Amino acid sequence: MSIVVEHEKRRKEILEKALDVFMDEGFEDATFQKIADRCGITRTTLYIYFKHKKEIFNYSIKLLLLKVEEDIQRIRSDTGLNSVEKITKVLLDILRRLEENRRLLLVILDYLLHLSKTGASPETRIRRRTLRLRHILSSMVIEGIKAGELNPVNIKTADDYLYSFIEAAIFQLVIMKPETVGNLREAVVFAVRQFTRKKDA
């Protein structure tokens, strides 16, 4: 068990150093050798943990999404919260995770720009990575409507609307580079309240 834990710990340490290389060199110019050098190990040792730089990059994204999903499941299982509170808390938690992972977002943007230059479709990659998250948001809206806590709405429209806050946060953090996305937090709280079903007088 301790070998597995040590292996995973080392992989995460490599990820941190690799992010530095991606930030300094850009995704395209970052090489496996440069990552090994930054980690103070040989390429052969690096191969024990990752097969190539794309795997390192994908693993970084996977870890972020796993953390987001764990947060979401914890919030969804909180019986003390109603649907509006759950959706609000989930979105605010995602914004916090994005703020904490600003460096990774910058690398992802660089990678997507690289894809565009090669003629590949970034949209397909983004949709594949975010499909589960969007599905979770849709499910939460459906649960809220069934519980009578949210107004009946078009689920796809509601999902696009809620997800747009995540996209706005990514844009602000990567392009505008503020310290936080506090303005979006207030907007999220206001926006989700608009879904609240008014009780009949």
Image: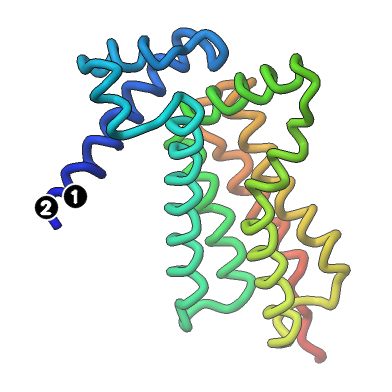
**Height in image: 175 above or below 55?**
above
* Front residue (pair 82, 19): 19
How many discs appear? 2
Q: Residue at x 69, y 57 (%)?
A: 134
Q: Residue at x 70, y 81 (%)?
A: 149
Q: In terms of image quadrants, where is residue 177?
A: top right
Q: Amino acid at mark 1?
A: Val
* Front residue (pair 124, 82): 124
Q: Residues within 10 Å of mark 2 (few under 14, many from 20)?
A: few
Position of the C terminus, as image quadrant, is: bottom right
Residue 112 lies left or right of residue 153; in this view the side is: left
Q: In terms of image quadrants, where is residue 90?
A: bottom right
Residue 57: horizontal and vertical position, in percent?
48, 31
The residue beneath circle 2 is: 2
Q: Amino acid at mark 2?
A: Ser
Residue 24 lies left or right of residue 106; in this view the side is: left
Q: Residue at x 55, y 23 (%)?
A: 106
Q: Residue at x 48, y 36 (%)?
A: 99
Q: Are marks 2 and 1 in contact (CB under 8 Å)?
A: yes
Callout 2 secondary element: helix
Position of the N terminus, as image quadrant, is: bottom left
**Extreme-front residue of the structure:** 44
The residue beneath circle 1 is: 5
Residue 144: horizontal and vertical position, in percent?
69, 78
Residue 39 lies left or right of residue 182; in this view the side is: left
**Height in image: 122 above or below 152?**
above
